[in-house]
Image (cartoon, rainbow, N blue to C red):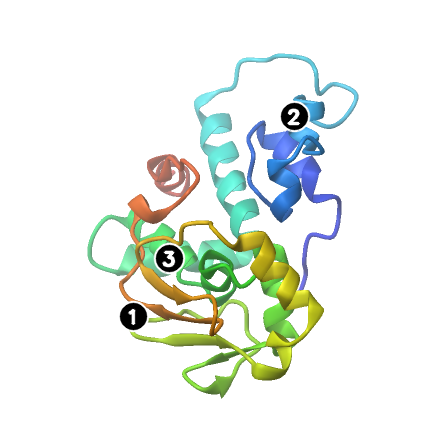
């Protein structure tokens, strides 16, 4: 599958907002946005007034980058959200928050969504006791995610626990960091998202 492979910090600079794509680095003085708060490229420091379309496009790009999905997959999520009952924008965010890689990250079993996606692919987790390696899989209410016993003993996961210890998990999951096990206790809502997102702008963009 195609995947963005360039520097993650450029994405935050382009959106002029922290997207928390690199875990602990985003909270430190090493954060590229803190050190250089302009868009990348030779014209990044120029200020310009965006059109209505430009504002809508930037919001869509921001959400795609937060969750690490490309355009085709993002459009499929949008179409799926539009078919569900309720507000399309909120349905879209709920689907994105329910991705396995995102839930793993939000439970504190990875320091970033990018790292969670990689660890899922490398078979470090189980879902309801079964091996799983599909980052885009949608987790449902009642599903249990657990770090495999062999992985828990690795230095990698010891470092992850140390880095995420003390951070508050969102309300739609319950987590036991000692057992490295978590349960999806509810369907995620817009209120559970830790970055402000104007989902109505995305709906307006796709409705044109």
Question: Which of pointers 3 and 2 lies earlier in the amino acid sequence?
Answer: 2
Residue 44 in the image: state x and y as whole percent. Answer: 71, 20
Residue 145 in the image: state x and y as whole percent. Answer: 44, 74
Q: Quadrant of the N terminus?
A: bottom right
Q: Residue at x 64, y 46 (%)?
A: 22
Element class at badge 2: helix
In this rendering, position of residue 55 left or right of residue 24? left
Q: Residues within 10 Å of mark 1 (few under 14, many from 20)?
A: some
Q: Which mark is residue 34?
A: 2
Question: Which of pointers 2 and 1 lies earlier in the amino acid sequence?
Answer: 2
In this rendering, position of residue 23 left or right of residue 198? right
Real-space Cα separation, disc 3 to disc 1, in angstroms? 22 Å
Element class at badge 1: loop
Looking at the image, is mark 3 or mark 2 nearer the viewer? 2
Looking at the image, is mark 3 or mark 1 nearer the viewer? 1
Does any portion of residue 66 appear in the rendered image? Answer: yes
The residue at which mark 3 appears reads as 79
The residue at which mark 1 appears reads as 141
């Amino acid at each position: 599958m195609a995947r963005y492979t360039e520097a993650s910090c450029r994405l935050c600079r382009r959106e002029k907002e922290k997207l928390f794509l690199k875990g602990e680095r985003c909270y430190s003085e090493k954060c590229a946005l803190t050190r250089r708060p302009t868009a990348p490229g030779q014209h990044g420091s120029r200020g310009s007034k965006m059109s209505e379309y430009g504002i809508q496009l930037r919001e869509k790009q921001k959400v795609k980058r937060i969750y690490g999905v490309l355009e085709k997959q993002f459009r499929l999520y949008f179409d799926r959200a539009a078919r569900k009952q309720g507000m399309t924008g909120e349905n879209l965010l709920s689907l994105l928050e329910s991705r396995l890689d995102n839930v793993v990250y939000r439970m504190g079993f990875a320091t970033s969504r990018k790292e969670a996606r990689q660890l899922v692919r490398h078979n470090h987790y189980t879902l309801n006791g079964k091996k799983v390696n599909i980052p885009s899989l949608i987790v449902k209410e009642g599903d249990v995610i657990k770090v495999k016993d062999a992985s828990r003993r690795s230095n990698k996961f010891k470092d992850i626990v140390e880095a995420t210890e003390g951070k508050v998990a969102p309300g739609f999951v319950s987590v036991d960091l000692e057992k490295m096990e978590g349960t999806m206790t509810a369907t995620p809502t817009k209120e559970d998202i830790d970055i402000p997102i104007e989902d109505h702008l995305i709906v307006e963009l796709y409705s044109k």
